Image (cartoon, helix red, strand yellow):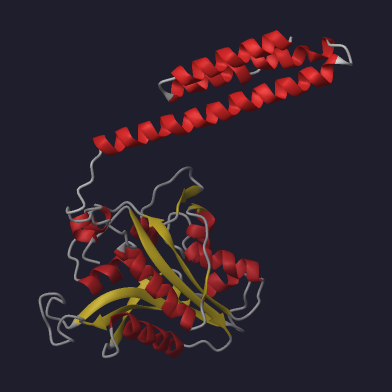
Amino acid sequence: MRDKLQEIKATALDELSKAVNLDQLESLRIKYFGKKGELTQVLRGMGKLSPEERPLIGQLANQIRDQIEEQLQVKRQDLEKVVQTKRLEEERIDITLPGRDFNLGTRHPLYQILDEIIDIFRGLGFSVVEGPEIELDYYNFEALNLPKDHPARDMQDSFYITEEVLLRTHTSPVQIRTMERKNSQLPIRIIAPGKVYRRDDDATHSPMFHQVEGLLVDKHVTFGDLKGTLLTFARQIFGQDRKIRLRPSYFPFTEPSAEVDVSCINCGGSGCRVCSHTGWLEILGSGLVHPRVLEMAGYDPEEVSGFAFGMGVERITMLKYGIDDLRLLFDNDLRFLQQF
């Protein structure tokens, strides 16, 4: 076995000295140190030696193994230097060339405005609540005073999965789920941001868009509380010189209901092309929570009241930035997005 080890040593050192690339070097490592390697096989056969020979042969085997490993490491370093030198020669770097700019991404303008809206209402004491985008008909319509076959459902034509399951048309179901979960606890003060879906698609409508709806339920909540809250919001999002007006409207889940307009951010209310020379821009819908909605959620409308509102984030974004086509927000055109 002593002769066998010396023979392996001589052959290994000779082959290592002749290796010309890292692939050959790896093959030699496996040849001698792999599971079936020559040196490995010899070491495994030491159990057959006599007790007197075993320590002597073991010492020699360890010395030879260390010598081969040392030579293997030296050769690897030499070959790696060769590879590195060749790569530097092939990839010459001209340090006189200008550096390359890296384009840093930013948040989409829609989400910039959404974050701003959330921050405003958090500052007013509202909590953020989310809910499922695939919703039950009961929460999307019936619990909001929109029974089956109600004509007002036509205003929110949706995408149905089954007769009882659909893609939500607004985030109002989050309000119902929150009121049920609170189990008549007061006060409730939430906003519900998220994606909603309707069968619309043109320059001012998209089949998928973003909404933020708000709900406040407590004792002695009045229309004045609603107006004060929305005036504060309008001034923080559009500027402190803004005014709002509330126009009578109809929503099945609020009574009385109102559309909310803000004085034109372009002309300040004097009249221009942006506001169709009216001085006002519509921004959201609102109203006091319908007594029937409170009842279905487990509240006594004789004891509590509340207000609700809902706005399209795309609408607010378009007004604030002067965007005239909603589809630009979804085209992913960097020339457009880099303006924000």
Q: Nearer the viewer, residue 286 or 292?
A: 286
Up/down of 114 relative to 74, above or below: below
Q: Residue visible at 24% across and 52% down?
A: 331
Q: Residue visible at 36% across and 64% down?
A: 111
Q: Nearer the viewer, residue 12 or 246?
A: 12
Q: Position of residue 119 (x, y in %)?
A: 43, 76
With 198 as the anchor, is 293 left or right in this view? right
Instruction: Residue 312: tell me if it is visible.
Output: no
Up/down of 74 relative to 286, above or below: above
Q: Quadrant of the C terminus?
A: bottom left
Quarter of the image where one finds residue 319: bottom left
Instruction: Residue 127: tell me if it is visible.
Output: yes
Quarter of the image where one finds residue 186: bottom right
Q: Residue visible at 23% across and 45% down?
A: 93
With 51 as the anchor, is 141 left or right in this view? left
Q: Nearer the viewer, residue 156 or 6?
A: 6
With 226 as the anchor, is 321 left or right in this view? left
Q: Nearer the viewer, residue 208 or 276?
A: 208
Q: Position of residue 333 (x, y in %)?
A: 21, 53
Query: Count of labels shown?
Result: 0
Q: Position of residue 76 (x, y in %)?
A: 48, 30
Q: Residue visible at 25% across and 74% down?
A: 320
Q: Position of residue 59 (x, y in %)?
A: 76, 23
Q: Quadrant of the N terminus?
A: top right
In the rendered image, the residue lying farthest to the right is 51
